Every structure is written in C-alpha cells, then in structure tokens.
Amino acid sequence: MTNAIDIRSMSRTFGRSRALDDITLTVQEGSICGLLGRNGAGKTTIMSILAGQDRPSSGTAEVFGAHPFENESV
C-alpha cells in the first residue's frame, strides 16, 4: 500500500517551547486513524503542518509523497 502520510524525525519549536519532539509516523492510504492527547500535546501542530499551514523546525512531513507547505496540490 501507499503511504498517505509519512512523518520522519519531525520537530517543531516555538521559541524555547518544543511542541513536537522527533516524531516519526506513517499512515497508509485508506486507513482511518485519530490523534489523541491532552491539551498541549501537539495534535493541532501536527495537523497544521500536514495541512500546509506551517512547516516543521526539523525533519520532514509528506502527504502522498509531497511536502505540503504552500503546496496547493497537496
């Protein structure tokens, strides 16, 4: 199967705060998954990066093999 989402060693910092710390995640095409966690766990940050509204401080995030940041086709 093809990977719909491929996140590798992704981190996101805001000043001295680290919202995501070395996240690695793969979601296969056609699967259904959810993000669970308490407030401040980084759920919105992950979704903002995958939606192309933000970019990671380090590492990579791909949606169907393309980087989503400012990429209208993604």
Image (tube, rainbow, N blue to C red):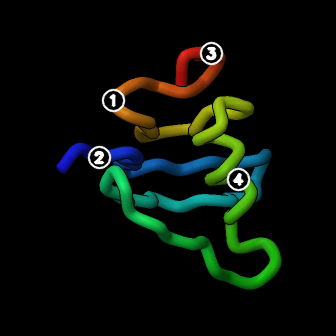
Q: Are marks 4 and 2 in contact (CB under 8 Å)?
A: no
Instruction: Assess whether mark 1 and mark 2 are in contact (beta carbons under 8 angstroms).
Output: yes
Residue 65, above or below 29: above
| Mark toward the start of the polypeptide (3 vs 2) | 2
The residue at 77%/47% (across/down) is: 14
Question: Which kind of residue does numbered mark 4 sit on?
Answer: Thr
Label 4 packing within 10 angstroms: few (<14), some (14-19), many (20+)? some
Alpha carbon of mark 2 to alpha carbon of mark 1: how far?
8 Å
Cα distance between the residues tagged 3 and 1: 14 Å
Residue tagged 4: 45
Instruction: Note whether 64 is above or below 48 in the view shown.
Output: above
| 2 or 1: tag closer to the N-terminus | 2
Identify residue for label 3. Answer: 72
| In this picture, residue 16 sits left or right of residue 32 | right
The answer to whether 19 appears left or right of 25 in the picture is right
Toward the bottom, the furthest residue is 38
Q: Amino acid at mark 1?
A: Gly
Mark-to-mark CA distance, 4 and 3: 19 Å
User: Residue 22 falls in which quadrant of the image?
Assistant: bottom left
Q: Amino acid at mark 2?
A: Asn
Q: Identify the residue position indicated by label 2 in the image.
A: 3
Q: Amino acid at mark 3?
A: Glu
Sequence-wise, which precedes: disc 4 or disc 2? 2
Q: Which residue is painted at 67% across and 59% down in the image? A: 18
The residue indicated by pointer 1 is 65
Nearest to viewer (mark 4 / mark 2): 2
